[in-house]
Amino acid sequence: MKVTGIIGSPRGKNSSTLRLMEAAIEGASQAGAETEILDVTKLRIGFCKGCGACYSRGKCEQDDDFSYAMEKLLKADGIILGSPSYMDSVTGQLKAMMDRMSDTIHCQQFSGKYGFSVCTTGSSGADLVVNYMNNFLISCGATVIGGAGAAIGQHPGSINEAMEKAYLMGKDLIAAIGEGRTYPEQEAVHRRYREIFGESIRANKEKWAHDYLHWVQRGWV
């Protein structure tokens, strides 16, 4: 069982978000998973160009580190996203990675995977950013087990409580994967997506040849 953490904090070893991510990864490791942390701020990932090559051919044509990062995510059973709150959202580095993953959403490539998110902020917005990242995971087809955040500017001690929560969630992530845990509300979201977006897949089956074939192979159209 493999768990990959993706962190988008530019502060390196000084990152409070990294402390949460490391706690979460430690929990997953203690529960028996093979783990790694991928720092997208150290990778060369360009902006999405909106060319649609991924929809038609199943592969981004930009020559950078995006494919390397995606290979890590697609091989993982569990995914943990981490970012500090930048203007009530994720950092630009992580957002660039997420924007390049529109085909992951189209094809629901995280179906069967589990995950959660962690965030730190100075005063407020941690829950908002955690929800943003978790909703992204759900949009990609994953099942989310929760999140952990800390407003360390207002409450410096909150990082310790959040680290304990992240550690326990890391362990619970492995339990969720092992038991194939389901959440009815998320299952409903996934079903609605396949029902609604299936119409777009059918309407664009020639232009989106790769995605249409994927949906056919999954038995969704």
Image: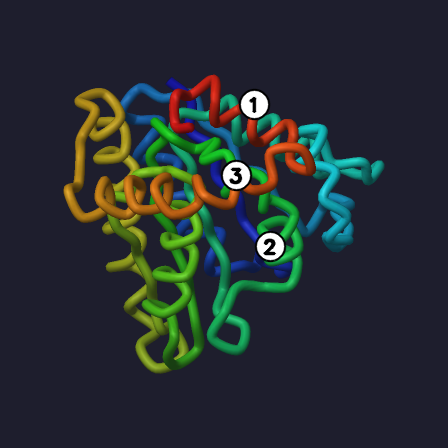
Asked if 74 appears above or below 85 in the picture, the reply is: above
Marks 3 and 1, how far apart at CA: 10 Å
Q: As rendered, which of 38 and 116 lies closer to the eye?
A: 116
**Going by the image, does 212 lie left or right of 78?**
right
- Residue 103 position within the rendered picture, expressed as x and y whole percent measured from the top left: 59, 40
Residue under label 1: 213
For marks 2 and 1, give the CA distance: 29 Å
Q: Is residue 100 above or below residue 27?
A: below
Q: Could you classify mark 1 by the number of other residues whose Cα lies within 10 Å: few (under 14), some (14-19), or many (20 or more)?
A: some
Q: Nearer the viewer, mark 2 or mark 1?
A: 1
Residue at image position (37%, 79%) is 124
User: Viewed as shown, does residue 79 lie left or right of 208?
Assistant: left
Name the quadrant containing residue 15: bottom right
Where in the figure is residue 205, as x and y percent of width and height? 60, 34
Few, some or many residues within 10 Å of mark 2 (<14, 14–19, 20+): many
Residue 72 x/y as whole percent: 57, 28
Q: Which mark is residue 201?
A: 3
Answer few, some or many: residues within 10 Å of disc 3's Cα (few below 14, many 20 plus, some between 14 and 19). Answer: many
Q: Amino acid at mark 3?
A: Ile
- Real-space Cα separation, disc 3 to disc 2, in angstroms: 27 Å
Q: Secondary structure at mark 1?
A: helix
Q: Secondary structure at mark 3?
A: helix
Tell which circle, 2 or 1, labels the residue nearer the N-terminal end: 2
Q: Residue at x 73, y 44 (%)?
A: 43
Q: Earlier in the sequence, mark 3 or mark 1?
A: 3
The amino acid marked with disc number 1 is: Leu
- The disc placed on residue 94 is 2
Give the secondary structure at mark 2: helix
Q: Amino acid at mark 2?
A: Leu
- Locate residue 184 relative to residue 72 in the image: left or right: left
